[in-house]
Image: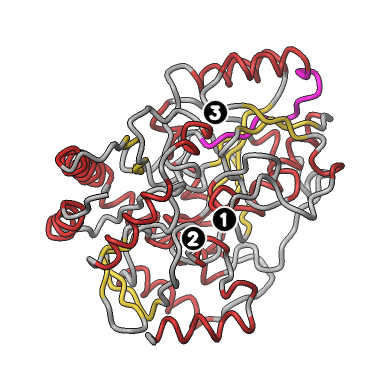
Amino acid sequence: MTTSEELFERAQRVIPGGVDSPVRAFGGVGGTPIFIERGEGAELIDADGNRYVDLIQSWGALLFGHAHPEILSAIAAAAAKGTTFGAPTLGEVELAEAIIAAVPGVEMVRLVSSGTEATMSAIRLARGTTGRDKLLKFEGCYHGHSDSLLAAGAGSGLATLGIPSSPGVTAGAAQDTLTSSFNDLQAARVLFAEWGRDIAVVIVEPVAANMGVVPPAPGFLEGLRELCDHHGSLLLFDEVITGFRMGLGGAQGVFAIRPDLSTFGKIMGGGFPCAAFGGREDLMSQLAPTGPIYQAGTLSGNPVAVAAGSAAIALAAMLDPYARMEQIAMTLVEGLAERFGRSGIPATINRSASLFSVFFTADPVRNFADAKRADHERYARFFHHMLAAGVYLAPSGYELWTLSAVLTEGHVQRVLDAAATFTG
């Protein structure tokens, strides 16, 4: 028995399913999850001493790989002064300023501790400022596990487990959630025609990344902006994944579309639990204590987390790794496509900037229904083939491949060499 297997047995006795986030249990691919001992740059080392090229990077939270020395230095300096105060600090002001300077659609920002908390709070703000109840989301887009966002088709985690929504979510909690198909602007228009006066907010991943990567069709995001403007609804971009990963200004900077509200997480925390929501000043100023809409958190703006986040954003601004990361993604996408083609394996690989994912299907993938029709059993076989070859992929065909700026040509070649020997 491996050390990971022993640890998983122990974990299952004290943690539901043996994991603290469901996809980690390998339910979508089978087998026993590997337990990680440490990370070094673009690589992971598990509890048995096996080394892997890491193409998860803590589900996108790490832009500069594991244990980056400048981020570690910032963390150590902050922690030496105290780990939490429950009071204002200079660090949270500096992180807020860095986000506002980088992201076009953010004029004020509130720091929180998770992406779920950010989207939940932003939706409350949208409902409070518009005086409307309904929200519109898209099948396959995941915005955290708050009740109103676990309506049907809530993205990667539920899709991996085959759960359409979730027990414990009441009909009352979900009744104000409207769901439409991603990239289907006409379907959104139909919903607005019926419910436009009641829709407070449209929440969307500008590049869907929780059904695998699905880029927006030409005109889709622009059309949502127009619908919101026409009906007096707010447009909320969930940039928890795309923020500071597609570019310093996020997807809204790449597509030049300004939402009213945005949510962020992952990279902006530098590897710590830290997230944010922000947007127009007139909306954000309605939050307590300056306005009537309540939101709070004991660990919001945690000094160690904001130090890590500020260091990560400063590195991104200084090093500007985005063009190189996109080139690496293109090399991987082209190389994988060539190797799958040589083996006669049907595959569609979607990419937007450095975000990409592999679907084992010959058909295009434009929405959640298309993503579900891909061959996820083949993905499971591919996952274990790559794991045995020392490449750590997401244990679900509904997740994206996440690159770090410290990937080398040698890492890329190791991935392509491993994929070349997969026969299906």
Q: Is residue 351 visible?
A: no
Which of the colour schemes (rainbow, by chain, secondary structure, one colour) is used? secondary structure
Residue at image mark 3 = 182
Q: Residue at x 51, y 42 (%)?
A: 239
Q: Residue at x 49, y 60 (%)?
A: 269
Nearest to the observer: residue 113 or residue 337: 337
Left or right, 85 with reference to 337: right
**Which structural element holds mark 3?**
loop
Q: Which amino acid type is shown beneath numbered disc 1?
A: Ala
Residue at image mark 1 = 275
| Quarter-of-image position of residue 404 | bottom left
Q: Which amino acid type is shown beneath numbered disc 2?
A: Gly
Query: Is residue 371 shown in magenta?
Result: no
**Which structural element holds mark 1?**
strand
Which of the two marks, 2 or 3, is nearer to us in this view? 3
Earlier-in-chain disc, 2 versus 1: 2
> Do callouts 2 and 1 mark residues in contact (Cβ within 8 Å)?
yes
Nearest to the observer: residue 407 or residue 292: 407
Distance of label 3 from label 1 (alpha carbons): 25 Å
Q: Which amino acid type is shown beneath numbered disc 3?
A: Phe
Q: Is residue 16 above or below residue 374?
A: below
Nearest to the observer: residue 245 or residue 12: 12
Q: Which residues are magenta?
A: 195-205
* Residue density around tag 1, few if under 14, some if 14–19, many if 20 or more, within 10 Å: many
Query: Is residue 202 shown in magenta?
Result: yes
Q: Which mark is residue 269?
A: 2
